Image (spheres, rainbow, N blue to C red):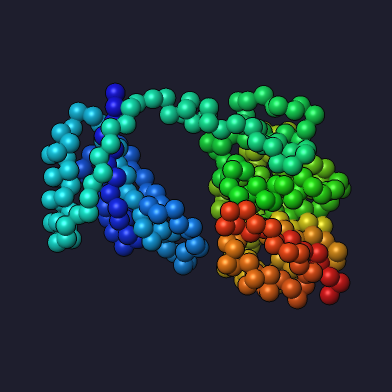
Amino acid sequence: MPWIQLRIPADPDTADQLEDLLMETGADAVSMEDAADQPLYEPDPGTTPLWHQTSVTGLFQSGRDIEQLCADIRSAWHQQTQQDLADIEVTLVEDKDWERAWMDDFKPMPFGQRLWIVPSWHDAPDPEAANLMLDPGLAFGTGTHPTTALCLEWLDGQDVNGCQVIDYGCGSGILGLAALLLGAEHVIGVDTDPQALEASRDNARRNQVADDRLDLYLPADEPDTRADIMLANILAQPLISLAPHLASLVKPGGRLVLSGILSNQARDVMAAYEPWFVMDEPEQREEWIRLTGRRNDR
């Protein structure tokens, strides 16, 4: 059975209202997408992050009269806002096993010479490698984003044997778990979201990582422990604000790895860490930056 897909351009002020309207009109699912391939900058606290140009898409069952459906949406929108709705793009989408199609699209990915991210339903291409098995449906991150890939490739190129590691903003735990599989002794994962900590623990158990090798904390509960390696793949403004705190958690001579930074933000983030670290030149992929440095003795 095909589906009727309606895509409507919106802006951040109207996107939530338009989403509600599509659901009220009978949409089985509604999503928001970037309408102009823009980077999503960090939002102000308490706000929903949205692009400046957003596309709101609703899926409706195929039995609906498309012309009448669009007319109903336009009429309801005008009643609510006294404004005319922008163009509605109509597409018929063939039904398929979306979960199977998505699983087929997610393949094992190498990061450097030793490390692979492998979906849990797939055999590892190299059984002798460090294979991090993930179920992307349960994870906050899978390695496909350039910021995560840059950090994974850095880890692959290091000797992390016996290291104490902090994964700050751990999400799915992918960076900390990769460090453990590559030989790190212990990882502390920190995240503001309790669900992220649950995802990290689930992924650790999926990879037979003993509970005592990975400790997980909300920021208010994190221990005052200094690490050999600090990993923080978050966003530029939090990284700048956290600079004194993250620096205090790195041993003299320890390594710092930061990502989630756009190219035009790199210098500001570097400047925030230079009082404590000798910073390397930025590494760039697409519009994203990885910063690394070594803790000085101060």
* Figure check: 173 above or below 294: above
In the image, 39: left or right of 270? left
Q: For the C terminus, which image quadrant?
A: bottom right
Question: Which sits in the foreground, 165 or 37?
Answer: 37
Instruction: Determine if residue 235 is in view.
Output: no
Q: Quadrant of residue 129?
A: top right
Q: Where residue 146 sits: x, y (%)?
A: 60, 50
Residue depicted at x 22% and y 54%: 86
Q: Residue at x 72, y 34 (%)?
A: 131
The picture places residue 229, in percent across and down from the top left corner, at 78, 56
Q: Is residue 95 above or below residue 201?
A: above
Q: In the rendered image of this protein, does residue 158 appear above or below residue 64?
A: below
- Residue displayed at 30% across by 42% down: 58
* Quadrant containing the N terminus in the rendered view: top left
Image coords of residue 84 (percent x, y): 16, 57
Q: Is residue 110 above or below residue 81?
A: above
Can residue 294 be seen in this snapshot? yes
The image position of residue 101, as x and y in percent, is: 47, 27
Task: Using residue 48 as the reference point, say whether residue 200 is left or right of it.
Answer: right
Residue 130 as seen in the image, left or right of residue 148: right
Marks counted in the figure total 0
Left or right of residue 78, residue 248 in this image: right
Frontmost residue, 59 versus 140: 59
Quarter of image, res 265: bottom right
Tell me what residue is drawn at x 76 percent, y 64 percent.
280
